[in-house]
Image: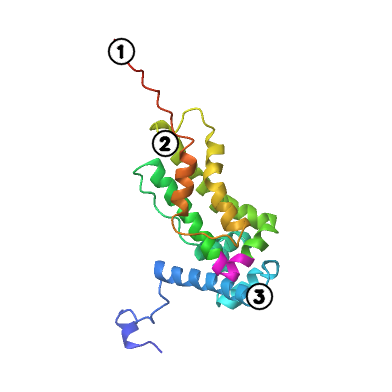
Amino acid sequence: MTSRAEAEGTPRPTAPGPARGRPRSEAVERAIVEGVMKLLEDGVPLAELSIERIARTAGVGKAAIYRRWSGKEELFVAVVRTAEPPDPPLPGTSMRDDLVVLLESLRQRGLVTRSSAILHNVYAQMKSSPKIWASYHDTAIAPRRRVGLDVLRRGRENGELRADLDLELVNDLFVGPMLVRAMMRPDDDLPEGLSEQIVDTVLAGLRPVSSPSVSSPTS
């Protein structure tokens, strides 16, 4: 039977549909990440986390996951990056200041990893999975290294660093001590001020050497 509204050409009111746009997308993404974290908290190994299982835990369809991540490896990296402290902006005031900020970020990630059993476990499992570790390296480690090299390159151009130095090696000289303490010697302290101490110690041997002043002959 034709309704009066239809007969008069008046459009029928429609029921409100689901919310669209960015807020809904962020809620779905958050549910997926939290679903992975819950499974990890329950002790499920990475190797046993399937997209189907993650979707069930998060209460979403598999398509919602694949729309955001190409596969399990990329999703795991996103979960780890969410749990890690965010990469800080660089002050840009000097090479030294930028290096201190970069090392401080590494120190903070070390502290979080030590205090989070989940992150500690996930890092260990990622290293045993070449595909997942390669994805983490490409999306997290490599970009951070490029930032460090850019800082050193600017420092060399500004005269804050000797021109004859291999920047790849110099970057390792700065990052290495913090990595050793944070990752390889978990019982070592990571005290405040360690970033400044490392940067200043290494820079002491890498700054340009001023030419000695020539004394005027005395009469």
The residue shown at (60%, 70%) is: 117
Q: Nearer the viewer, mark 1 or mark 3?
A: 1
110 or 142, which is in the foreground? 110
Please rate how many residues cluster around mark 2, counting C-alpha atoms within 10 Å: few if below 14, some from 14 to 19, many from 20: some
Q: Who's the residue at 50% across and 64% down the image?
A: 82
Q: Which residue is mark 1?
A: 218
Q: Is residue 79 visible?
A: no
Q: Quadrant of residue 160?
A: top left
Instruction: Name the spot of residue 161 as percent of width and height, x first.
Output: 44, 34
**Disc 2 element:** helix
Give the residues drawn in magenta, as a range.
114-121
Residue 37: horizontal and vertical position, in percent? Answer: 57, 72
Q: Is residue 116 above or below residue 95?
A: below
Task: Classify mark 1: helix, strand or loop.
Answer: loop
Q: Residue 21 appears at what percent x and percent y?
A: 40, 67
Tell me if residue 11 is in the magenta stretch.
no
Q: Amino acid at mark 1?
A: Thr
- What distance separates the C-alpha of mark 1 from that of mark 3? 80 Å
Q: Which residue is disc 2 drawn over?
A: 155
Residue at mark 1 to residue at mark 2: CA–CA distance? 39 Å
> Label 1: few (<14), some or many (≥20) within 10 Å?
few
Decide which of tag 1 and tag 3 comes sooner along the chain: 3
- In the picture as drawn, the residue positioned furthest to the bottom comes out as 1
Q: Residues within 10 Å of mark 3 (few under 14, many from 20)?
A: few
As drawn, the label of residue 43 is 3
Label 3's element?
loop
Q: Mark 2 or mark 1, which is nearer the start of the sequence?
A: 2
Identify whether 178 is placed above or below 94: below
Q: Position of residue 55 (x, y in %)?
A: 59, 73
* Image position of 210 (left or right of 175): left
